[in-house]
Structures are given as C-alpha cells and as structure tokens.
Amino acid sequence: MATTIENPLALEQQVCFALAIASRSVIAVYKPLLEPMGLTHPQYLAMLALWEHEPLKLTDMSRMLQLDPGTLSPLLKRLEASGYVRREKDPGDERALAVVLTPQGRALRERALEIPPAIVDRLGMDIAELRELHRRLTAVIAAASPRDEG
C-alpha cells in the first residue's frame, strides 16, 4: 500500500531540504578542524584526492571531485599559494597539467589523519551507520546524476 503525504509541498517533507541542511551542517563540523590547517572543505576534498591518487591530471581531478575546471582552478591556485600543491606539465601528456603535492602538502596528511575520528565522534554515529549512510547517499547521487543517452 502506497503512503500518501498529506502536503506534498511541506518543506520538512522535502528530501532536497534535508540533504541541503545535512550538507551544510556536516561541512560546518569540519570547519574548525580544517581552519588550523589553512583548508576549506573543498580544498580538503582536493587534498584527499591527491593523497590517494597523486599525481592527478587536472581533468581527472575535476571528474573525481565533480567540479568543473572553472571552479577547480581557483581552488588549486589557493592550495598552490599555501605551498601544498604544484601544477606542472604532465610527463605523459605535455598538453595537460598535473597536480602534485609538495613536501608540505604530503606532511599535511599526517595532521589530516585526526579528522575522520573527530568527525565520527562529533556526529555520534558508529562506523556501520556512517557506512550505510554513505551507501545510501551514493545511491541517491547515482540516481540523480545525468544519464548517458546513447
């Protein structure tokens, strides 16, 4: 039997509203942990990608972070000004730019290791709950992503 919603336009019933508030709230939890490192949340995501996959072509990083190059470029310029990354010609493709970590950027990883447990503690959810949430959000992202028609 299908459930009916009394008011389908009720704000508190909207998935988009809950996701927007959850996103802002969780990112706010990261802020005091990232500020001493000189990172914003988008910069932290870029550093996570680099700590795992360095070097990264600009195009690959853009796809991985789901950021258009126009948004990614200024973010990388700020990381470069902070001394964490360098943009250089990709040795495999002279026409492409690759992003590499500096020694300072590599060293920052050690400090970043403190962030995940602090987030888990602050959210008060166990790892299994967070993994299930991640799984469900990944399914939502896939369902909402544009589909290739071809």
Image: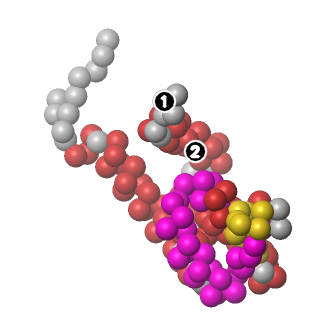
Q: Give the image location of residue 97, x and y in percent.
A: 70, 69
- The number of numbered badges drawn on the structure is 2
Label 2 vs label 1, nearer the camera: 1
Of 61 and 141, nearer the camera is 61
Say if residue 4 shows up in the picture.
yes
- Vertical placement of 37 versus 49: above or below? below
Question: Type of residue at label 1?
Answer: Glu
**Residue 63 — which label?**
none
Of 52 and 3, nearer the camera is 52
Q: Give the image location of residue 45, x and y in percent.
A: 61, 64
37 left or right of 18? right
Q: Residue at x 28, y 21 (%)?
A: 3
- Residue furthest toward the front? 95
Image quadrant assignment for residue 103: bottom right
As for residue 82 lying within the magenta part, the answer is yes
Structural distance between the alpha carbons of marks 2 and 1: 27 Å
142 left or right of 111? left
Q: Residue under label 1, please give it.
A: 149
Mark sitting earlier along the chain (2/1): 2
Say if residue 117 shows up in the picture.
no
Image quadrant assignment for residue 134: top right
Q: Give the image location of residue 34, x and y in percent.
A: 58, 76
Q: Which residue is drawn at 17% across and 29% down?
A: 6
**Residue 134 — which label?**
2
1 left or right of 6? right
